[in-house]
Each structure stands twice: as C-alpha cells, then as structure tokens.
Image: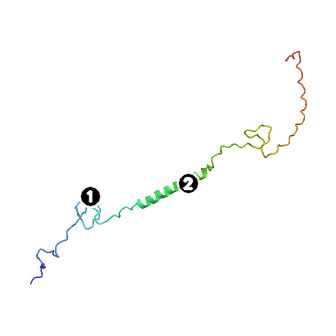
Amino acid sequence: MSTGQATVQPGEDGPSADAPPEPLRCPRCDASLRDDQDWCLECGAPARTRLAPAPNWRVPAVVVVTMIVLAGAAFAFAFVRLTDDGGGPAPSSTVTAPPGQPGPGQQPGQPAPGQQPPPVQEAPPAEPVPPPAPAPDDPVPTP
C-alpha cells in the first residue's frame, strides 16, 4: 500500500551533496557575485549588506510645528493683553460742568443747585503805571 507520498531515492532528480553551490546573484541586476564581494560591481547595490531605512521625521516635524504655533498664539495673546486699553464704557452723552462753571441752562452768576456760591475776593488795587518818557526832538548824531 502506498501512503500517497513519493519518496525520492538518492540520485533521482534530487540535489546531490557533491554539486557546487550556485554563485550568489545581485538582488537588483542579477549579476553574479564572488563569495568575498559585499557590493555588486555592476550596479553598486549592496549584495550582503542591508542598509538601515532612513529615520521617520514626521513625528519630530509635527512636534516642532506644534510648538511654533503654540508660541505664536501665546505671543499674540500676550500682545493683545498688554496693548488693550480697556475699552471701558462708552462716554455718556450728558455733560457735567466742572465746579465753578455754570451748567447748561444756567446764568453765569447763578450757583449750581445744591451748591453755595464761592466767597468773592476783591482784587488788590493796581499800582499806577508811569507814562513813558517823551522822545527828544533833536536827533542824536551817530559817530
């Protein structure tokens, strides 16, 4: 009885232990390589050496851009806070007169309602100003 598996007898289409190994081939251009060769002499590709992939710069770039955006936002916020003049309420349309001046609709001599008139002080008498000296009638010769 057969189990369905074929058995290979030595010497029948199987690899022989005496056969020389196939020469190493370049993975890129399929050129044959010697045993001591690390690089292909035809295309320059690494035969046995595997180069490490380039690092992924996406995450550090995103971090740097995020930091720049946050710094810009903080700068803008600080600038607005420092230059804000408060805005405050809009000035009212009613006009209040400073003390001592008549309000609208009052005569200059009347005191404001609820205020006492200020005491009147008399000005000291002015000293008389002497008249200017008359000009001479005869002109003075210049040397």
Q: Residue at x 19, y 68 (%)?
A: 22
- The residue wearing badge 1 is 43
Q: In this view, does 142 lie above or below 82?
A: above
Q: Give whichever of 71, 35 is nearer the camera.
A: 71
Quadrant of the snapshot with the N terminus: bottom left
Percent of width and height locating residue 89: 63, 49
Element type at mark 2:
helix
* Disc 1/disc 2 C-alpha distance (Å): 58 Å
In the image, is residue 5 above or below residue 22?
below
Residue 70 shows in the view: yes
Q: Mark 2 points at which residue?
A: 77
Q: Is 73 on the left or on the right of 92, as rendered?
A: left
Amino acid bearing label 1: Cys
Residue type at the position of mark 2: Phe
95 sits to left or right of 122:
left
Q: Camera-side residue: 34 or 107? A: 107
Q: Residue 104: which quarter of the image?
A: top right
Residue density around tag 2, few if under 14, some if 14–19, many if 20 or more, within 10 Å: few
Image-quadrant location for residue 136: top right
Secondary structure beneath label 1: loop
Q: Can residue 57 be seen in this view?
A: no
In this rendering, is residue 12 above or below 42? below
